[in-house]
Image (tube, rainbow, N blue to C red):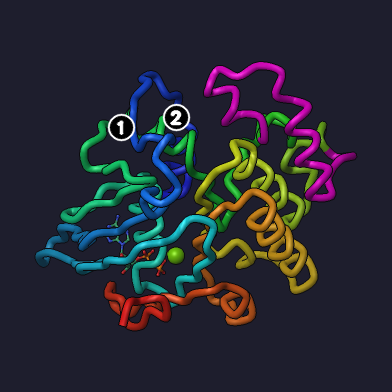
Amino acid sequence: MTRHGFFVVAFLRRERLTFGCADERHSAVQAPPILEARKLTKTYRSGAGELTVLADVSFEVERGSTCAILGPSGSGKTTLLGLCAGLDQPSSGDVLINGASLGNLDEDARAALRNREVGFVFQSFQLMSNLTALENVTIPLELRGERNVADRARDLLGRVGLGERSGHYPTQLSGGEQQRVALARAFINQPKLLFADEPTGNLDGETSGRVVDLIFELNRELGTALILVTHDLELARKTERVIRLRCGRVDQDSGAAS
Ligand code: ADP
Ligand code: MG
Protein backbone atom coordinates (compact mmCIF):
# COMPACT_ATOMS: atom_id res chain seq x y z
CA MET A 1 0.00 0.00 0.00
CA THR A 2 1.31 3.49 -0.76
CA ARG A 3 2.09 5.87 2.07
CA HIS A 4 -0.98 7.89 1.22
CA GLY A 5 -3.04 4.73 0.88
CA PHE A 6 -2.04 3.91 4.42
CA PHE A 7 -2.97 7.41 5.54
CA VAL A 8 -6.42 7.27 4.03
CA VAL A 9 -7.19 3.90 5.59
CA ALA A 10 -5.92 5.19 8.93
CA PHE A 11 -7.92 8.34 8.46
CA LEU A 12 -11.17 6.56 7.78
CA ARG A 13 -10.57 3.92 10.39
CA ARG A 14 -13.60 2.99 12.40
CA GLU A 15 -13.69 4.67 15.76
CA ARG A 16 -14.57 2.41 18.63
CA LEU A 17 -14.10 4.55 21.67
CA THR A 18 -15.89 7.57 22.80
CA PHE A 19 -13.70 10.01 24.58
CA GLY A 20 -13.77 13.42 26.11
CA CYS A 21 -11.32 15.99 24.87
CA ALA A 22 -11.39 19.75 24.77
CA ASP A 23 -14.55 20.90 26.39
CA GLU A 24 -16.82 22.41 23.76
CA ARG A 25 -18.40 24.47 26.49
CA HIS A 26 -15.19 26.43 26.93
CA SER A 27 -16.12 30.06 26.65
CA ALA A 28 -15.03 31.66 23.40
CA VAL A 29 -12.42 33.63 25.31
CA GLN A 30 -10.75 30.51 26.66
CA ALA A 31 -11.02 28.38 23.53
CA PRO A 32 -7.61 26.98 22.68
CA PRO A 33 -6.11 27.39 19.20
CA ILE A 34 -7.58 24.79 16.85
CA LEU A 35 -4.07 23.42 16.24
CA GLU A 36 -0.81 23.59 18.16
CA ALA A 37 2.37 21.94 16.93
CA ARG A 38 4.91 21.79 19.76
CA LYS A 39 8.55 21.08 18.97
CA LEU A 40 7.72 18.40 16.43
CA THR A 41 10.63 16.23 15.41
CA LYS A 42 10.50 13.22 13.12
CA THR A 43 13.46 10.97 12.49
CA TYR A 44 13.75 7.79 10.46
CA ARG A 45 16.33 5.13 11.02
CA SER A 46 18.21 4.17 7.91
CA GLY A 47 21.18 1.87 7.28
CA ALA A 48 23.60 4.76 7.56
CA GLY A 49 22.09 6.20 10.74
CA GLU A 50 19.25 8.54 11.54
CA LEU A 51 17.57 10.83 9.05
CA THR A 52 15.88 13.85 10.62
CA VAL A 53 13.07 15.00 8.32
CA LEU A 54 11.46 17.48 10.75
CA ALA A 55 13.28 19.28 13.54
CA ASP A 56 11.69 21.28 16.31
CA VAL A 57 8.71 22.62 14.36
CA SER A 58 6.32 24.73 16.44
CA PHE A 59 3.36 26.90 15.50
CA GLU A 60 -0.23 27.60 16.47
CA VAL A 61 -3.20 27.98 14.16
CA GLU A 62 -6.20 30.05 15.17
CA ARG A 63 -9.75 28.92 14.60
CA GLY A 64 -11.12 29.81 11.20
CA SER A 65 -7.76 31.08 9.92
CA THR A 66 -5.99 30.17 6.68
CA CYS A 67 -2.37 29.14 6.36
CA ALA A 68 -0.15 27.90 3.53
CA ILE A 69 2.87 25.69 4.07
CA LEU A 70 5.49 26.18 1.38
CA GLY A 71 8.85 24.54 0.86
CA PRO A 72 10.96 22.66 -1.65
CA SER A 73 10.27 19.03 -2.39
CA GLY A 74 11.59 16.87 0.46
CA SER A 75 11.45 19.68 3.03
CA GLY A 76 8.99 17.76 5.20
CA LYS A 77 5.62 19.27 4.25
CA THR A 78 3.72 15.99 3.86
CA THR A 79 5.34 14.58 6.99
CA LEU A 80 4.28 17.68 8.94
CA LEU A 81 0.70 17.45 7.71
CA GLY A 82 0.51 13.76 8.62
CA LEU A 83 1.74 14.51 12.15
CA CYS A 84 -0.64 17.45 12.61
CA ALA A 85 -3.62 15.40 11.45
CA GLY A 86 -2.70 12.53 13.79
CA LEU A 87 -2.10 10.15 10.88
CA ASP A 88 1.50 9.63 11.91
CA GLN A 89 3.34 10.02 15.21
CA PRO A 90 6.29 12.31 15.95
CA SER A 91 9.60 11.05 17.32
CA SER A 92 9.27 13.83 19.88
CA GLY A 93 7.03 16.81 20.46
CA ASP A 94 3.26 16.92 20.49
CA VAL A 95 0.23 18.08 18.53
CA LEU A 96 -2.88 19.51 20.18
CA ILE A 97 -6.11 19.63 18.23
CA ASN A 98 -8.72 21.83 19.84
CA GLY A 99 -6.73 21.60 23.06
CA ALA A 100 -6.49 17.79 23.10
CA SER A 101 -2.98 16.37 23.09
CA LEU A 102 -2.63 13.63 20.46
CA GLY A 103 0.33 12.25 22.38
CA ASN A 104 -2.02 11.26 25.20
CA LEU A 105 -4.43 9.38 22.95
CA ASP A 106 -4.30 5.85 21.62
CA GLU A 107 -4.99 5.11 17.96
CA ASP A 108 -8.72 4.63 18.47
CA ALA A 109 -9.09 7.90 20.34
CA ARG A 110 -7.02 9.72 17.70
CA ALA A 111 -9.30 8.26 15.01
CA ALA A 112 -12.34 9.52 16.91
CA LEU A 113 -10.84 12.99 17.23
CA ARG A 114 -9.96 13.09 13.52
CA ASN A 115 -13.40 11.96 12.57
CA ARG A 116 -14.93 14.72 14.64
CA GLU A 117 -12.63 17.67 14.02
CA VAL A 118 -10.50 17.11 10.94
CA GLY A 119 -10.87 16.92 7.17
CA PHE A 120 -7.98 15.82 4.96
CA VAL A 121 -7.54 16.23 1.20
CA PHE A 122 -4.77 14.14 -0.30
CA GLN A 123 -2.77 15.15 -3.34
CA SER A 124 -3.77 11.99 -5.16
CA PHE A 125 -7.46 12.13 -4.12
CA GLN A 126 -7.48 8.66 -2.47
CA LEU A 127 -11.07 7.79 -3.23
CA MET A 128 -12.24 4.22 -2.70
CA SER A 129 -12.50 2.81 -6.21
CA ASN A 130 -15.26 0.34 -5.39
CA LEU A 131 -17.56 3.05 -4.00
CA THR A 132 -19.61 5.62 -5.90
CA ALA A 133 -18.99 9.35 -5.47
CA LEU A 134 -21.90 9.52 -3.03
CA GLU A 135 -20.66 6.56 -0.99
CA ASN A 136 -17.15 8.02 -0.88
CA VAL A 137 -18.58 11.20 0.62
CA THR A 138 -20.83 9.50 3.19
CA ILE A 139 -18.20 7.12 4.48
CA PRO A 140 -16.81 9.32 7.31
CA LEU A 141 -20.31 9.80 8.72
CA GLU A 142 -21.23 6.15 8.34
CA LEU A 143 -18.11 5.21 10.25
CA ARG A 144 -19.45 7.47 12.96
CA GLY A 145 -22.67 5.48 13.02
CA GLU A 146 -24.79 8.29 11.58
CA ARG A 147 -27.78 7.37 9.46
CA ASN A 148 -29.65 9.18 6.72
CA VAL A 149 -26.49 10.89 5.57
CA ALA A 150 -27.13 10.64 1.83
CA ASP A 151 -29.04 13.94 1.66
CA ARG A 152 -26.15 15.87 3.21
CA ALA A 153 -23.69 14.17 0.87
CA ARG A 154 -25.90 14.99 -2.15
CA ASP A 155 -26.02 18.63 -1.05
CA LEU A 156 -22.25 18.80 -0.83
CA LEU A 157 -21.78 17.06 -4.18
CA GLY A 158 -24.13 19.67 -5.63
CA ARG A 159 -21.99 22.42 -4.07
CA VAL A 160 -18.88 21.05 -5.76
CA GLY A 161 -20.76 20.86 -9.07
CA LEU A 162 -21.19 17.10 -9.17
CA GLY A 163 -24.87 16.79 -8.34
CA GLU A 164 -25.47 14.71 -11.45
CA ARG A 165 -22.49 12.41 -10.88
CA SER A 166 -23.24 10.97 -7.44
CA GLY A 167 -23.73 7.44 -8.78
CA HIS A 168 -20.45 7.42 -10.70
CA TYR A 169 -17.35 5.51 -9.66
CA PRO A 170 -13.95 7.25 -9.44
CA THR A 171 -12.75 5.70 -12.71
CA GLN A 172 -15.70 7.38 -14.45
CA LEU A 173 -14.61 10.82 -13.20
CA SER A 174 -11.79 13.12 -14.33
CA GLY A 175 -8.97 14.08 -11.95
CA GLY A 176 -10.59 17.42 -11.16
CA GLU A 177 -13.93 15.76 -10.49
CA GLN A 178 -12.31 13.19 -8.22
CA GLN A 179 -10.60 15.98 -6.27
CA ARG A 180 -13.97 17.70 -5.85
CA VAL A 181 -15.46 14.45 -4.50
CA ALA A 182 -12.51 14.28 -2.11
CA LEU A 183 -13.28 17.86 -1.01
CA ALA A 184 -16.92 17.01 -0.39
CA ARG A 185 -15.75 14.02 1.68
CA ALA A 186 -13.36 16.23 3.67
CA PHE A 187 -16.17 18.67 4.52
CA ILE A 188 -18.97 16.20 5.25
CA ASN A 189 -18.22 16.18 9.00
CA GLN A 190 -18.07 20.01 9.04
CA PRO A 191 -14.49 19.92 10.34
CA LYS A 192 -12.95 22.75 12.34
CA LEU A 193 -9.65 22.00 10.64
CA LEU A 194 -8.93 21.07 7.03
CA PHE A 195 -5.54 19.82 5.88
CA ALA A 196 -4.92 19.70 2.16
CA ASP A 197 -1.69 18.32 0.69
CA GLU A 198 -1.08 20.03 -2.65
CA PRO A 199 -4.81 19.89 -3.45
CA THR A 200 -4.25 21.42 -6.86
CA GLY A 201 -0.99 19.61 -7.64
CA ASN A 202 -2.56 17.22 -10.14
CA LEU A 203 -5.08 19.61 -11.69
CA ASP A 204 -5.00 21.90 -14.71
CA GLY A 205 -5.25 25.67 -14.22
CA GLU A 206 -8.98 26.09 -14.62
CA THR A 207 -9.95 23.07 -12.51
CA SER A 208 -7.42 24.08 -9.89
CA GLY A 209 -8.97 27.57 -9.63
CA ARG A 210 -12.38 26.02 -9.09
CA VAL A 211 -11.12 23.69 -6.34
CA VAL A 212 -9.35 26.58 -4.59
CA ASP A 213 -12.47 28.76 -4.71
CA LEU A 214 -14.45 25.95 -3.15
CA ILE A 215 -11.97 25.40 -0.35
CA PHE A 216 -12.09 29.09 0.61
CA GLU A 217 -15.87 29.24 0.24
CA LEU A 218 -16.23 26.37 2.68
CA ASN A 219 -13.75 28.10 5.00
CA ARG A 220 -15.89 31.24 5.00
CA GLU A 221 -19.18 29.40 5.43
CA LEU A 222 -18.19 26.82 8.02
CA GLY A 223 -15.35 28.70 9.71
CA THR A 224 -13.04 25.78 8.98
CA ALA A 225 -9.35 26.61 9.52
CA LEU A 226 -7.32 25.76 6.40
CA ILE A 227 -3.80 24.42 6.34
CA LEU A 228 -2.74 24.03 2.73
CA VAL A 229 0.54 22.53 1.56
CA THR A 230 1.28 23.93 -1.86
CA HIS A 231 3.86 24.77 -4.49
CA ASP A 232 1.40 27.23 -5.95
CA LEU A 233 2.30 30.80 -4.97
CA GLU A 234 -1.02 32.03 -6.31
CA LEU A 235 -2.80 29.80 -3.81
CA ALA A 236 -0.41 30.80 -1.00
CA ARG A 237 -1.22 34.46 -1.66
CA LYS A 238 -4.85 33.79 -0.80
CA THR A 239 -4.04 32.64 2.72
CA GLU A 240 -3.57 34.95 5.70
CA ARG A 241 -0.32 33.34 6.68
CA VAL A 242 2.58 31.51 5.05
CA ILE A 243 4.94 29.13 6.82
CA ARG A 244 8.06 28.19 4.84
CA LEU A 245 9.85 24.94 5.58
CA ARG A 246 13.44 24.26 4.63
CA CYS A 247 15.20 21.01 5.43
CA GLY A 248 12.61 20.10 8.05
CA ARG A 249 12.74 23.41 9.90
CA VAL A 250 10.54 26.50 9.89
CA ASP A 251 12.49 28.95 7.77
CA GLN A 252 9.92 31.78 7.82
CA ASP A 253 6.54 32.17 9.46
CA SER A 254 4.61 35.28 8.51
CA GLY A 255 2.28 34.66 11.48
CA ALA A 256 4.97 34.17 14.13
CA ALA A 257 4.75 36.44 17.15
CA SER A 258 7.51 39.01 16.84
P1 ADP B 1 7.65 17.06 1.05
O1 ADP B 1 6.21 16.74 1.23
O2 ADP B 1 8.05 18.43 1.53
O3 ADP B 1 8.12 16.84 -0.35
P2 ADP B 1 8.09 14.75 2.73
O4 ADP B 1 7.49 15.10 4.05
O5 ADP B 1 7.30 13.83 1.87
O6 ADP B 1 8.52 16.07 1.97
O7 ADP B 1 9.49 14.05 3.00
C1 ADP B 1 10.51 14.68 3.76
C2 ADP B 1 11.73 13.78 3.79
O8 ADP B 1 11.43 12.63 4.56
C3 ADP B 1 12.17 13.28 2.42
O9 ADP B 1 13.59 13.30 2.38
C4 ADP B 1 11.65 11.87 2.40
O10 ADP B 1 12.43 11.05 1.58
C5 ADP B 1 11.76 11.46 3.86
N1 ADP B 1 10.80 10.41 4.24
C6 ADP B 1 9.46 10.51 4.20
N2 ADP B 1 8.89 9.36 4.64
C7 ADP B 1 9.91 8.53 4.95
C8 ADP B 1 9.98 7.20 5.48
N3 ADP B 1 8.88 6.49 5.76
N4 ADP B 1 11.22 6.66 5.69
C9 ADP B 1 12.33 7.38 5.43
N5 ADP B 1 12.33 8.64 4.95
C10 ADP B 1 11.13 9.21 4.72
MG1 MG C 1 4.75 16.16 -0.10
Q: Quadrant of residue 102?
A: top left
Q: Secondary structure at mark 2?
A: loop
* Whole-percent x, y for residue 181 in the image: 71, 45
Residue 140 among magenta residues = yes
* Whole-percent x, y for residue 145 in the image: 55, 17
Q: CA distance from mark 1 to mark 2?
A: 9 Å
Is 68 drawn above or below residue 192 in the view shown? below
Q: Is the CB of mark 2 within 8 Å of ligand 1?
A: no
51 and 119: which one is in front?
A: 119
* Whole-percent x, y for residue 47 in the image: 13, 61
Which residue in the protein does label 2 denote? 13
Between discs 1 and 2, the one toward the N terminus: 2
Please tell me in which quarter of the rendered image ligand 1 is found.
bottom left
Kindly check if marks 1 and 2 are in contact, taking CB atoms under 8 A apart as contact: yes
Magenta range is 137-165
Which numbered marker is on residue 107? 1
- Looking at the image, which residue is at 49% across and 67% down? 229
Is 148 drawn above or below residue 177 in the view shown? above
* Whole-percent x, y for residue 171 in the image: 74, 43
- Looking at the image, which residue is at 36% across and 20% down? 17
Main secondary structure of the magenta stretch: helix
- Looking at the image, which residue is at 64% across and 65% down? 200
- Looking at the image, which residue is at 68% across and 53% down? 218
